C-alpha cells in the first residue's frame, strides 16, 4: 500500500517540464536505437550491458578480485569503445548535421526535380532493357567531394543519353558510379565504399557499393544489374529492388520533393519566429 501511495505521489508531482524531459530522453534513446539497429554496434551494446550487470553483481556478492578487474578494464575500455564505435559515431554526427534546422536548399523548384528524375528514370529503363550495369548516385545534403575525387570529373547537364553513354560496356567510365549534384553529372567512374552488411549472394559489387554510400551519407543510389537488368534503389543503407522506370520516377520525385518541402517549411517557420521576436 505504501508503494502504491508513493507512486501516486510521484505522479501528482509530475510537471509539464518533467513530461518534456522524459519525451526528449525517449526520443534520443529511440534515435540511438535506430542508428545502431542491425549493425555491429547492436551486439557491442549488448556485451557492454552484460559487463555492467556482472560488475554490479560482483560488487554485491563481494567478489573483490573480479570486481577490481572489471572496474579497471572498463576505465581503459572507454578509449577502446570510441575507436570501435567510430563508424557509428560518425554516422550519428552526420545524422545530427542533417537535421532540418541546418539544411540547405538543394533544388529550386519541383519542375527541376521532375526534369532530373525523368532523365534518370529513362536512362535506367534503357540500361535495364539491354542489361547494362549502372550505378547512379544523387547527392543531397551530405557532400560527396571525397567520392568525386576518386573518379573522372565531367560537370555536364544530366541527360538520359549521357548517362547511357557513361555506362556503355568496355569503356573507361563504365566501372564505378556517376555522381549527380543538383541537376548536373559532376563525375563518373567514382569508387564507393562497400557495405559491411551480410547481403544476399545474388547482389554484386554495384549493389554493395550502393548500400555502402547510403550508409555513410543521405545520398540516393539507383542501380541497374548487369546480370538481370533489375533496377534497384538504395537509401539509408537499405536496398529495394524490382523497380519499373515509372515506379522509380514516382519514388524519386516523392523523396526529393519531400526534402525540398521540409526545408522550405523549416525556413518559413524560422523566418516567422524571427519576425515575431523582432516585433516584440
Image (spheres, rainbow, N blue to C red):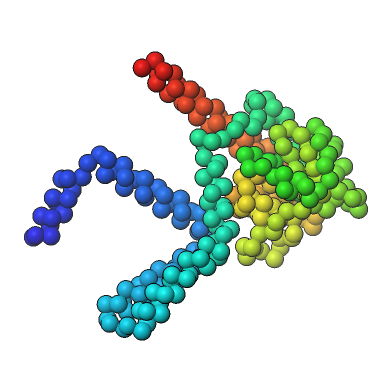
Q: Where residue 110 sits in the image (x, y, percent)?
A: 64, 26
| Image quadrant in which the N terminus is located | bottom left
- Which residue is rendered at x = 52% and y = 62% of the image? 82
Image vertical order of residue 34 relative to residue 61, above or below: above
Image vertical order of residue 207 relative to residue 129, above or below: below
- Which residue is rendered at x = 31% and y = 47% of the image? 22
* 139 relative position to 236: left or right: right
Image vertical order of residue 62 relative to residue 56, above or below: below
Instruction: Tell me where residue 252 sits by quadrant.
Output: top right
| Image quadrant in which the C terminus is located | top left
Instruction: Tell me where residue 20 sits by quadrant.
Output: top left
* 155 relative position to 247: left or right: right
- Which residue is rendered at x = 64% and y = 32% of the image? 106
- Which residue is rendered at x = 78% and y = 39% of the image? 186
* 238 relative position to 229: left or right: left
| Residue nearer the viewer, 78 or 7 | 78
Q: How many marks?
A: 0
Q: Where residue 25 sits in the image (x, y, percent)?
A: 36, 49
Q: Where residue 222 sits in the image (x, y, percent)?
A: 71, 46
Instruction: Tell me where residue 137 sits by quadrant.
Output: top right
Q: Is residue 121 visible?
A: no
Q: Where residue 198 sits in the image (x, y, percent)?
A: 62, 65
Looking at this rendering, what residue extends furthest in the top direction? 279
Q: Is residue 21 visible?
A: yes
| Residue nearer the viewer, 80 or 5 | 80
| Residue nearer the viewer, 212 or 53 | 53
Amino acid at each position: 500500500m505504501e508503494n502504491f501511495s508513493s507512486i501516486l505521489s510521484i505522479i501528482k508531482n509530475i510537471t509539464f517540464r518533467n513530461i518534456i524531459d522524459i519525451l526528449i530522453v525517449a526520443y534520443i534513446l529511440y534515435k540511438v536505437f535506430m542508428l545502431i539497429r542491425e549493425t555491429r554496434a547492436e551486439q557491442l551494446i549488448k556485451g557492454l550491458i552484460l559487463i555492467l550487470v556482472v560488475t554490479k553483481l560482483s560488487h554485491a556478492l563481494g567478489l573483490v578480485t573480479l570486481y577490481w578487474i572489471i572496474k579497471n578494464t572498463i576505465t581503459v575500455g572507454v578509449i577502446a569503445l570510441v575507436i570501435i564505435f567510430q563508424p557509428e559515431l560518425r554516422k550519428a554526427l552526420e545524422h545530427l548535421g542533417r537535421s532540418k534546422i541546418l539544411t540547405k536548399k538543394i533544388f529550386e523548384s519541383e519542375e527541376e526535380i521532375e526534369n532530373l528524375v525523368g532523365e534518370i528514370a529513362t536512362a535506367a529503363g534503357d540500361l535495364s532493357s539491354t542489361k547494362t550495369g549502372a550505378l547512379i548516385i544523387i547527392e543531397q545534403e551530405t557532400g560527396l567531394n571525397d567520392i568525386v575525387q576518386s573518379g573522372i570529373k565531367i560537370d555536364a547537364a544530366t541527360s538520359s543519353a549521357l548517362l547511357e553513354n557513361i555506362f556503355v560496356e568496355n569503356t573507361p567510365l563504365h566501372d564505378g558510379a556517376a555522381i549527380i549534384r543538383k541537376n548536373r553529372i559532376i563525375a563518373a567512374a567514382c569508387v564507393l565504399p562497400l557495405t559491411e552488411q551480410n547481403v544476399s549472394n545474388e547482389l554484386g559489387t554495384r549493389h554493395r557499393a550502393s548500400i555502402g554510400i547510403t550508409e555513410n551519407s543521405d545520398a540516393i543510389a539507383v542501380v541497374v544489374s548487369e546480370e538481370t537488368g533489375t533496377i534497384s534503389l538504395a537509401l539509408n543503407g537499405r536496398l529495394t529492388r524490382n523497380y519499373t522506370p515509372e515506379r522509380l520516377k514516382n519514388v524519386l520525385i516523392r523523396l526529393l520533393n519531400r526534402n525540398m518541402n521540409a526545408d522550405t517549411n523549416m525556413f518559413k517557420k524560422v523566418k516567422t519566429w524571427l519576425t515575431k521576436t523582432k516585433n516584440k
